[in-house]
Structures are given as C-alpha cells and as structure tokens.
Image: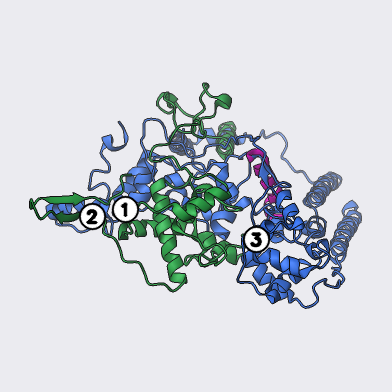
Chain colours: A blue, B green
Amino acid sequence: MRKVILRPYLLAITLFLFTTVYSYAQETAEAQPAESAAVVDSPVPNGNAENGEKLFKSLCAACHKPYSRAVGPALHGVVDKYDGDFEWLYAWIKNSAELIKSGDARANAIYNEYNQVAMNAFPQLSNQDMDDILAYVELPAPVIEAPVPDGKDVPVQTGIPTDLILGILSFVLLLLAVILYLVNKTLNRFAEVNGVKLYEDGAERKPLWKAYVENQFLLLVTVVVFLLGTAWFGYGYLMQVAVDQGYEPIQPIHYSHRIHAGDNKIECKYCHASARVSKHSGIPSLNVCMNCHKQISEVAPETLAEGKEEYSIDYNKEIEKLYEAVGWDKNTQSFTGENKPVKWVRIHNLPDHAYFNHSQHVSVGKIECQTCHGPVEEMEYMYQNAPLTMGWCINCHRETNVQVKDNEYYTKIHEELSKKYNIEEFTAADMGGIECGKCHY
Amino acid sequence: MKISNLFILFLALTFISCADKNNPNYQYFPDMYESLAYEAYSEAEIFENQQTAMIPVENTISRGWMPYEYDNNLDGYALAKVELVNPLPYSEEHLTNGKELYDIYCATCHGKKGDGQGYLVEREKILGVPSYDDQGRAITEGSIYHVMYHGINTMGSYASQMSEEELWQVDHYVVKLKNALEGKPERAYETNEAIEITVEETGEVMQINFESSN
C-alpha cells in the first residue's frame, strides 16, 4: 500500500529538483551579452592603426606598452601630452639622443624622468610610419579583455555546482534506503498475516563460517591464496620503500612546465643551463625567470581562464609571487634589492651512494631529457616520472645503444670496440657502463 | 570473514599510504641516502637562511671567467661597441657550438635567422625583438657581447647560463647571422690549429697558437 503512495511522490521531488537546476544553469549561460566599446575619434587622423600595430610590435614593444609603463612610458595619450606637436614627436622617435643634446626642454624632462635610459634611434621610420604607430597606441584600451575574472568565471562552473549534484544524489539514495526498508517491513507483515513461514522452526541453522571451516579443500585454497597474496603484496610493499616515483610536491611558486616547455617550446636547457656542463641540472635562479617575465607580467586572458578552469590556479598571482621573491617593482620597472629566496622542493634526489652526472648524459650521451623525466612538456605539476632505482638505470644502460655517430667523445672507444668485438653498435653496458665502480665509489 | 576484512583493511591502508604524492616515500636505514658532505642546493647552517645557492662573493672571480671591464651603462655599452673584439678565432668548431647555444638561448625570441621572429614573438608573448640588421642599433661584436653579459632594457643577462667562452662563441654566430641578413659575404673560417711559420734563417719551425686559453 505505502509503496504505491510513495513512488509518485518521490518521482515528483526528483523531477522538481532537476528542472530547477537545469533552468538555473540556462539562466547563467544566457546572462552574458557582450558590450563593444564605443568608437572614439583618433587624435592621429591620417594614421593607419593596423600597420602601426605591426610596426609597434616589432620595433617599440621591447620597451613600451600602450597602456602601462614598461622600460619606457606608456604611449597612450602621448599625442595629447605634447599638444599634437607631431614634428617634435617625429624628431624624438627618429633620434632622441640628438634632441636631448640640442637642449630641448621637453626632451630633457622626459629623459631625466625615466632615469636617463636612452631610447634607440629609428632612422628607418618615415613620417607616415610614425603616424601609423601613434594611431595604434592612441586606440582606446580594449575593454573586452579586461573583465575576464567576472565575465568568464560564472559560466566556467558549467551551470551546476558539484556540491549540489552530490547533495541531490545522497538525498535520492537516502530516499531509496527508506523505501526499501518500508517495503521489506510491509512484505514481512503480509507474510505474517497470511501465515507464510519464512524460517523453519526448531532447526538451528549452521553459521556460514562454520560450514566453510569444516570444508578442508576450501580452507586449503584459502590458505594458499592468502600466503601467495601476502608474499605478492609484501614484496611489492618492500620494493617501493624509498622509491619516490610519482612524487609531486606543491612548490612555493606554481610553475607550469606545460606552458613553458610545451606551449611556448622553451628549451629545457634554457632554464636548466647547467645540465649541459655540470653534474647537476641546476634549478634556475630567478634572474632566468626575469629574462622573459620582465616583459610578461600577466598571462594571456585565455591562459588565465584555462588555469582557473582546469587547475584552479591564478597564473597572474604566481607571477606576482615571482616579482615579490626577486624584488621587482612593476611600477618603477626596477629591482628593489629586497629579495626573498624561494625554497623550491627538490623532487629528484638520488641517494648519496650513487653518482649521477647530467652533463655525461645530456651533452656526451645526447639523451633527451624526457627519456628519464617523462613528458615534462605536458606536466602542469612536475612529478618524478622514473623510479630512479638501480635496476632502472642498469636496464637503460643495457638496452640503449650509444650514439656514436658524429660524437667525438666516442670516436676512439668506438674504433677499439668495433675492432675487438666486430660490432658496429654497442650499449653503455658494453663499454663498462654497468660496472659497480662507475656509479658507486 | 574477519580475516578477509582485515586483509581488505590492510590493502586499503597500503593504497592510501601510497596515494600521498605530496610527500616523499619513507626510507629504510637511510644512512647512505643522505649526504654528510655539503651538496649543491643542500641546506647548510653556516649560511644565512641555510641557503647554499648564492651569488659569488664580491671581488672574486668565478672559475673560467675574467673580469669584464665595461660598465653596465650607456658609456660602457658605447665603449664596448667600439673597442671590444672577440678573442676566439672564427673557426668552424666555435661556430657549431655557437649555433647550438644560440638555438637554445637566443632563437626562442630572436629567431633562428636572427630576424627577431622567434617562436615567442610569433605567439606575441614577447614583442619588439629587433632584427640583427637593425640600422638604429648597428650592433658589433663588442656590443653583442656587452648586451649578452649585462643585458639591456627588457633583455636579461645571459652570463649565468653560459660561460665566457660560450658567450663569445654565440657572439661569432650572431655576427654571422647579421652578415647573412645584410647580404654580406660569409667570413672565411680561421684555422683553430697552430699556424706554422718557418723562420728562414735558422730553419726552425715556430708555432703560433691561436687557440683561446680558456
């Protein structure tokens, strides 16, 4: 009886819940009308901003940004600043040093304001070129790119919050449990009323475990399985002691190898320069970061959105952390001299009794970094890819042929070995790469 | 039942303990694991903040380097541009190394050809990278080295990533790229080996070694 009453009720509740959630999701998706900025009259009437953009990006952008200070001042508004005196601007852009020398007051003022950093001369630019550049920098700042945080964040959550889904699920499960309990109770009552006997009276049922124990064959099988299992897991357990494969610590500043080595194809050795010439593949000092991040103070809006969406990381905040650590003041574009060294967490660490030399593998053996470190260019978080156990080292030494071609390190040993054993290809093991003393001394 | 329950619990615990990827695994008798000697990047009490990765002490010269006398300012740049010359012979070996290093450290912005169209420029991550044949800059051997050593404007110093000799090798290669961009004929290789000069009077063979003494 109750079952019949309950079911439509339950259906109604779940239906109601799902429809409300669905409509909520639709609302958030629709509430996003993009507003384009109004067109403002350019103070440079005869300039072609498109051509100017190209010129600006190739010639000026090293030191200038249109809307914020870089090495030089922000250029937006420069025409108004100098009262539309185009002749003066042309003279400055073409050869600022000459203008300063001539004693021009405005030239000297800006030169001194920016710590006497000289601007390069651009004799190759025509007046039309300069008009184009000025037209480009005088374009109003794009408004659409700015509201990324509040604009893209809402639909990022894909409508339904995970908590809500989980809540509904657990609610449904709870209802199911209650229903089952009620059904069971009702059926029992029916049985009682109709006089159906569920259990035979008197006969004491033998517990399951007793029947199991009394069956010797089953017991034997159990013991064998148990022993084998223990041996198997025990062995596996002992073998992973002190092996840090998959170790993925949280670093003080989040650095995405995926973006740097993957998307931007920066060479591994650009940052880990000492891997070429030394035992250690050094952790880059922060000045190496600043080689690019002096100019890149913010990531592209798409990258920012991707980071927040997929990894819940605000990349811009991580760059801020870098600036704080290295002591870089974005507003004055200079180092403050107050730095806070970063305590990176070391991931790959060989025990003291094993010797490993990076340059020997990278420069001499010409082994790709990825052979041991795995697909670093895809790693958002860096982790230890290889077990770094002795067996792993030895395997590679046995299996990998030494790259002898065009490799003067091996010219001599290749000649000798190929004469002695009559072979063309040989592995590291063939030339003594698995002798104890090579790594343990 | 009880035994299998325990077993499952044991398995679960094992998996849970393995699943913690944020911490390193534990070690068994780690006597020979941790170095007693100071290692690169290890923490050392004798230094402030226990930091061993530090810049060289003032007024000392790193191994493989000679003091660089041109200041990191406009005057130094102008002076280096005029006077400084590459001490390495223009040899095939130095240029091969120079190219290899250039492709790692410079090409990502300056482009493989030196035209300022590197991958990062193409992706508009870094902007305003000049071509080596830029007239306003008119770079020379000396100014190239000066800029690599000290950095200029947004470009940083590369002295921490390459040695003195390597910087000069890149210097040769950049000049080669610049000449190629300007359509100038390629400079002939200088031999890296000793040039033998026979002194007529005595018949003695003198060797003048042009190799750099790095």
**Can I make out residue A51 in this image?**
no
User: Are there few (<14), some (14-19), or many (20+) residues within 10 Å of tag 1?
Assistant: some
Along the viewing direction, whichever of A89 and B42 lies nearer the viewer:
A89
Q: Is residue A441 left or right of residue A202?
A: left
Disc 3: which residue: A98
Between circles 1 and 2, the one closer to the viewer is 2
Q: Residue at x 61, y 69 (%)?
A: A123
Question: Which amino acid type is shown beneath numbered disc 3?
Answer: Glu
**Please, what secondary structure does the residue beneath circle 3 have?**
helix
**Please, what secondary structure does the residue beneath circle 1 have?**
loop
| Chain of the residue that carries numbered disc 1 in the rendered image | A
Residue A439 x/y as whole percent: 32, 36
Q: Residue at x 43, y 48 (%)?
A: A372
Res. A400 mark: 1
Residue A260: name its quadrant: bottom right
| Chain of the residue that carries numbered disc 2 in the rendered image | B
Disc 2: which residue: B193
